[in-house]
Image (tube, grey):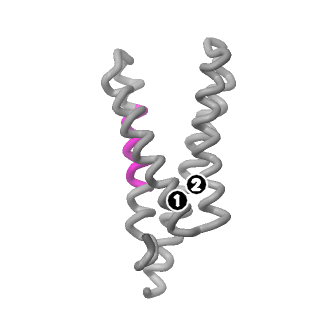
Amino acid sequence: MNSISLRSAGLSRWALIGWTLLLWGSRLRLVLGNDELDGWGIVIRVLVVGVFVALAILVAVRASPRTLALLVWWTLVYWLVRGGAILLSDEDLAFKGVHAALMVISWSTAVWAWRARQPGST
């Protein structure tokens, strides 16, 4: 593997980690500041944030193909399910547009990190 490929693998992995922490750190702030949520509504949303943050930290600390796969696939599946539900919901167009953009950026960084991983990794 040449040095450009190694840099791309590292850059894409850190882009995914950074994006994940930025997005879900912001989400946590929104959840905790939402006076309309209580009880299980808060718990479920905080757990989702916790999974994303924990996986991002795991990939940052232990950059193995397996940990990267966990974050990549969790990102892709989460946004397929949740993003799809948002797009099909009765929410307003602006809300759908913002979440569609978040979904596309999340998918793009996840796919970039997966495709740029070191050859021979599974």
Q: Circle 2: is it few (<14), some (14-19), or many (20+) Cα within 10 Å? A: some
Asked if the residues shown at circle 1 and circle 2 are in contact, with their CB atoms under 8 angstroms apart, the answer is yes
Residue 20 in view (yes/no): yes
Q: Quadrant of the C terminus?
A: bottom left
Task: Give the residue number, with chain letter if any, for mark 1.
Answer: 15
Q: Residue at x 45, y 63 (%)?
A: 113
Relative to 105, 66 lies left or right? right
Alpha carbons under labels 1 and 2: distance apart: 5 Å
Residue 51, quarter of the rendered image: top right
Is 70 drawn above or below residue 8 in the view shown?
above
Q: Which type of secondary structure does the marked residue at label 2 adopt?
A: helix
Residue 103: say if magenta: yes
Relative to 107, 12 lies left or right? right
Along the line of sight, the residue nearer the viewer: 14 or 37? 37
Residue most extreme to the bottom:
2
Amino acid found under the numbered disc labelled 1: Ala
Amino acid found under the numbered disc labelled 2: Gly
Image coordinates of residue 35 in percent, x first then y, are 66, 14
Along the line of sight, the residue nearer the viewer: 69 or 19? 69
Task: Please state the extent of the stretch shown in magenta in the rendering.
Answer: 98-109
Q: Circle 1: is it few (<14), some (14-19), or many (20+) Cα within 10 Å? A: some
Image coordinates of residue 10 in percent, x first then y, are 53, 71
Image coordinates of residue 65 in percent, x first then y, are 50, 68
Q: Residue at x 35, y 15 (%)?
A: 90
Q: Residue at x 36, y 30 (%)?
A: 97
Residue 18 is labelled as: 2
Q: Residue at x 63, y 19 (%)?
A: 40
Along the line of sight, the residue nearer the viewer: 11 or 60? 60
